Image (tube, helix red, strand yellow):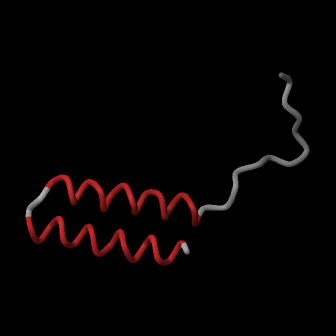
Amino acid sequence: MVWLILATALVVLVTGVALAQGLILAGGLVLAGVAGQLFAPPRTVRGRHDRW
């Protein structure tokens, strides 16, 4: 699933650059950011409790 989003982001990004369309380019960057967020492991700190 993540690879599909990343591939789609790449296609949209290249299309936005080729057509010189800022909105398409921005959409490709957003999709790339979403894919990057899904690739990253969850950020948790073990052994530490919240004080709230």
The quarter of the image holding the C terminus is top right
Which residue does the image show at 22% across and 59% down from the upper left? Answer: 25
> Which x, y percent locates residue 22?
15, 54
Which residue does the image show at 21% across and 72% down from the upper left? Answer: 14
- Say if 25 sits above or below 3 in the image: above
Q: Residue furthest left?
A: 20
Left or right? Give the position of 24 relative to 37. Answer: left
Residue 9 appears in which quarter of the rendering?
A: bottom left
Which residue does the image show at 21% across and 59% down from the upper left? Answer: 24
> Which x, y percent locates residue 32?
40, 63
- Say if 51 sits above or below 41 in the image: above
The quarter of the image holding the N terminus is bottom right
Left or right? Give the position of 31 relative to 52. Answer: left
> Which x, y percent locates residue 18?
11, 71
Question: How many numbered marks appear?
Answer: 0
- Say if 17 sits above or below 22 in the image: below
Residue 12 appears in which quarter of the rendering?
A: bottom left
Residue 20 appears in which quarter of the rendering?
A: bottom left
- Say if 45 sits above or below 41 in the image: above
Which residue does the image show at 84% across and 30% down from the upper left? Answer: 50
Left or right? Give the position of 3 relative to 8. Answer: right
